[in-house]
């Protein structure tokens, strides 16, 4: 059995149509989904059974209220009760439907049901976030102050009768002021709410009908220091209509907050709709410690300044007490802190457009931060500027919001510019995680912007999904060691991720697709780590770019670029631009794959000290100079500080295995059976025997010639000699023409052109189909064959698979290859380790 807790909230009060409470009144509890009567009820202790539930008696501290109780296995309920003659009574946290007749009622008796929503039940879901600030909201005293005598037509000024109940709650030390539902209460001036007060306005509307806001926690004559103003206030439910004028409809043209809190602690606005704000803010949390805005809707805003100077106004402003920002003193720079904005909607109303910003700050003071700001699980449907603007925020989280169609950035965290503010405000520990930002029209979708003398540190931008950004996806500027990890960026007008003057940036595990410029640009920054990112298509420029800062002087240095998968970059997969020094690129895979990528890794002439190791630049039909476009700045590409291309990097042609010195001695474009450094001897082949010498060749290499070199003895009376190319299974792929009796003098390189392949009886070249082991064949029939430059001979191990050395004997004219059937005999006897090469 699972027990769910209900009752005990300001909404759980029975009233008649005029707002009078119904004390000691019977109440039925029904399951919200089926309407079945729930009889298994318990007191708050979960043990004591309740036979019949009734509202509190008239002599209690809260007459007419439904006390705390528990229901078995029912997560959502409806109350049903008799209202007596006349119109039905009301209770509950949300509007319900009128039901059938109740038993025992007289003529005209009605019964009304109200659903208690899941959110107002006390059965808190597992993992639900706790309240902001150091404590939970403070409960008021048990006094109830229902508003009676109001006209409620939205035209008449009902301020006096509402304020009378707010004053009564103040004089009683606190309580709950109840606005009966179903009415529109006009107010021609601000209402003032005092300490320990709950305003329950579920189902009611409060509307500004003059040229002012609606509710605040101070009188204009009051001043407070710190967080000592009227505190422990809750505003629950209701539509709070700011009634901004639009030239045709609305009365408010002034710059006024709909609801405002100043110099206080523990202020909550929950389940409210704030509509049609004029020039200022829907809810202002100014110098508030422990402010909460939960499950609210902010609909409609108009800049009535006449100069378009209020396009930045926030629906929820988080502010500090300074002249020009706070409505009253003291102007002691007390900041808001411990603020939670959760589960809210921000967008246009039926007649007005969106706010300048959904949530944010725009005021600052020397040495003052807004601490512990949490913006969680909100829906932001268009703004004039940023969606969330964290100005001077510290130790804060902006997470799991859905933001679309902002005029500028979806999310920006920043600090004042010291050049204009006259002071440096450094901020740290801000997390931007799990947000969805769609179609921001200007600036970067997510921005963290510091300044040269006011850097941000400890910024994390993790796991966000960005789409269709008109400019850049993510920008970190003047940040110290920002972490940008696990984000998905799909389609940007400019760069995907831009780290600018941000030393120690970690850019890891991001997925970037269809960026307008560089997918990842790290400029003017030292010691960036760019690892494990997946880049697919840049319209222009490069996959990863390291370069100068915007001042064209500050170099990018010591970047590590490793394990990235880059496909279809507009120009180079990786570009080390002007003065990019000491950078390491290793283990990256770069593919052109039908795109316009011109080179795998490209270096500017003065991009010095680069190390390029083990990058996979294959399957692009690039030779080494194309795959690694290094200009005059020779990078290290292999062990022993070798700078020979491509070194340990894999390309389709010009792969250079072996020792660095041997590689350095190999002429460009030449593939050799062995290094000339190893050829200190000469070996003599047997006449008429086809000898195969192993050689490694890359895929896609076009071979036009085969060359062998004679030693100190030339050929005597040759009758036939020709060269062949074979695959790893000894099958012939290509051959030269028979040179018959042509001389082959001593100490001479004999180069013969390809004449026939397996696919053409007359062909000038052959292109390899795979990378790996091949063989070069040599057959000489002569009275005395020439000696051949070699590493010597090998006898004992020559026939061990895959083998090398002598094959067919008694050869004269070369075989015909076009039928594709010529494969040499198995290896036998000793092997010549001859020096040969292809070009």
Image (spheres, grey):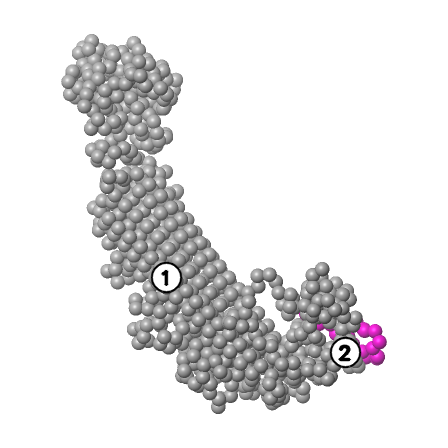
Q: Kindly identify the residue that appears in the image at 37 percent across and 55 percent down.
A: 506
Residue 511 appears anywhere in the view: yes
99 sits to left or right of 829: right
Q: What x and y, as percent, mark residue 335?
A: 43, 77
When asked about the image quadrant of residue 239, the answer is bottom right
Query: Residue 161 colored magenta?
Result: no
Residue at the image position 25 percent from the left and 52 percent from the top: 581
Residue 99: within the magenta? yes
> Which residue matches tag 1?
476
Q: Secondary structure at mark 2?
A: loop
- Relative to 676, residue 206 above or below: below
Residue at the disc numbered 2: 25
In the rendered view of the protein, which quadrant contains the N terminus? Answer: bottom right
Q: Looking at the rendering, in which quadrant would you find the C terminus? A: top left
> Is 97 positioned to the left or the right of 670 in the image?
right
Identify the image quadrant of residue 426: bottom left
* Magenta-colored span: 95-117
Q: Are marks 1 and 2 in contact (CB under 8 Å)?
A: no
Residue 109 vertical position relative to residue 442 in the rendered view, above or below: below
Magenta region, mostly helix, strand or loop? loop
Residues 537 and 632: in front is: 632
| Coordinates of residue 775 in the picture (x, y in percent) | 31, 23
Look at the image and tell me whether residue 151 can be seen: no
């Amino acid at each position: 059995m699972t027990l769910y807790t209900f009752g005990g909230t300001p909404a759980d009060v029975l009233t008649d149509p005029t707002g009078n409470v119904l004390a000691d009144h019977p109440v039925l509890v029904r399951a919200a989904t089926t309407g079945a009567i729930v009889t298994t009820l318990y007191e708050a202790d979960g043990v004591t059974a309740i036979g019949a539930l009734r509202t509190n008696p008239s002599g209690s501290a809260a007459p007419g209220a439904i006390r705390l109780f528990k229901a078995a296995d029912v997560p959502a309920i409806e109350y049903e009760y008799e209202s007596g003659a006349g119109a039905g009574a009301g209770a509950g946290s949300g509007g319900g439907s009128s039901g059938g007749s109740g038993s025992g009622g007289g003529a005209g008796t009605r019964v009304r049901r109200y659903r208690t929503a899941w959110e107002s039940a006390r059965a808190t879901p597992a993992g639900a976030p706790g309240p902001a600030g150091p404590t939970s909201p403070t409960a008021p005293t048990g006094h109830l102050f229902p508003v009676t005598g109001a006209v409620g037509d939205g035209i008449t000024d009902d301020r006096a009768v509402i304020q009378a109940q707010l004053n009564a709650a103040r004089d009683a030390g606190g309580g709950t002021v109840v606005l009966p539902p179903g009415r529109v209460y006009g107010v021609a001036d601000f209402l003032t709410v005092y300490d320990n007060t709950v305003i329950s306005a579920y189902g009611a509307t409060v509307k500004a009908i003059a040229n002012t806001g609606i509710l605040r926690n101070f009188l204009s004559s009051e001043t407070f220091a710190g967080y000592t103003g009227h505190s422990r206030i809750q505003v629950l439910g209701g539509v709070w209509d700011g009634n901004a004028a639009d030239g045709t409809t609305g009365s408010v043209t002034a710059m006024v907050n709909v609801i405002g809190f100043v110099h206080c602690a523990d202020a909550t606005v929950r389940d409210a709709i704030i509509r049609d704000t004029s020039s200022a803010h829907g809810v202002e949390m100014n110098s508030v410690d422990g402010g909460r805005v939960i499950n609210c809707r902010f609909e409609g805003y108009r800049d009535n300044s006449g100069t378009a100077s209020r396009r930045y106004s926030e629906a929820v402003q988080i502010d500090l007490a300074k002249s020009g920002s706070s409505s009253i003193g003291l102007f002691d720079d007390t900041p808001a802190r411990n603020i939670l904005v959760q589960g809210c909607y921000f967008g246009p109303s039926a007649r007005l457009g969106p706010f300048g910003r959904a949530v944010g700050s725009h005021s600052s003071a020397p040495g003052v931060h807004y601490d512990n700001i949490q913006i969680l699980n909100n829906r932001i449907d268009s703004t004039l500027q940023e969606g969330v603007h964290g100005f001077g925020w510290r130790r804060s989280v902006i997470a799991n919001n859905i933001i679309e169609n902002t005029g500028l950035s979806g999310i920006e965290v920043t600090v004042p510019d010291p050049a204009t503010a006259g002071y440096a405000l450094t901020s740290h520990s801000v997390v931007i995680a799990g947000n969805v930002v769609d179609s921001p029209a200007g600036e970067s979708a997510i921005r963290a912007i510091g300044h040269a003398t006011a850097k941000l540190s400890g910024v994390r931008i993790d796991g966000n999904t960005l789409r269709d950004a008109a400019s850049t996806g993510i920008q970190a500027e003047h940040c110290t060691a920002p972490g940008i990890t696990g984000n998905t960026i799909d389609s940007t007008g400019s760069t995907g991720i831009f780290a600018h003057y941000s030393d120690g940036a970690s850019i890891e595990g991001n997925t970037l697709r269809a960026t307008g410029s560089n997918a990842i640009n790290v400029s003017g920054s030292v010691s960036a780590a760019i690892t494990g990112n997946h880049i697919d298509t840049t319209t222009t420029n490069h996959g990863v770019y390291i370069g100068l800062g915007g001042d064209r002087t500050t170099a990018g240095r010591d970047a590590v670029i490793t394990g990235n998968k880059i496909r279809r970059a507009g120009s180079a997969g990786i570009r080390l631009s002007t003065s990019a020094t000491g950078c390491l690129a290793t283990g990256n895979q770069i593919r052109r794959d039908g795109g316009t990528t011109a080179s795998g890794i490209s270096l500017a002439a003065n991009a010095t000290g680069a190390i390029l190791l083990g990058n996979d630049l294959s399957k692009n039909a690039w030779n080494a100079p194309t795959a690694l476009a290094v200009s005059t700045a020779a990078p290290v590409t292999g062990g022993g500080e070798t700078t020979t291309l491509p070194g340990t990097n894999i390309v389709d042609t010009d792969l250079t295995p072996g020792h660095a010195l041997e590689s350095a001695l190999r002429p460009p474009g030449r593939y050799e059976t062995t290094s000339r450094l190893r050829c200190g001897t000469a070996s003599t082949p047997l006449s008429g025997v086809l000898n195969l010498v192993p050689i490694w060749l890359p895929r896609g290499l076009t071979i036009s010639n085969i060359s062998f070199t004679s030693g100190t003895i030339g050929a005597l009376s040759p009758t036939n000699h020709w060269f062949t190319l074979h695959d790893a299974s000894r099958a012939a792929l290509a051959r030269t023409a028979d040179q018959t009796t042509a001389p082959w003098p001593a100490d001479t390189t004999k180069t013969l052109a390809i004449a026939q392949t397996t696919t053409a009886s007359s062909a000038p070249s052959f292109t390899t189909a795979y990378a790996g082991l091949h063989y070069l064949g040599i057959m000489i029939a002569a009275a005395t064959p020439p000696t051949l430059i070699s590493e010597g001979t090998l006898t004992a191990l020559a026939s061990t698979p895959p083998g090398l050395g002598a094959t067919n004997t008694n050869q004269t004219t070369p075989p015909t290859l076009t039928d594709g059937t010529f494969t040499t005999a198995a290896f036998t006897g000793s092997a010549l380790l001859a020096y040969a090469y292809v070009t």
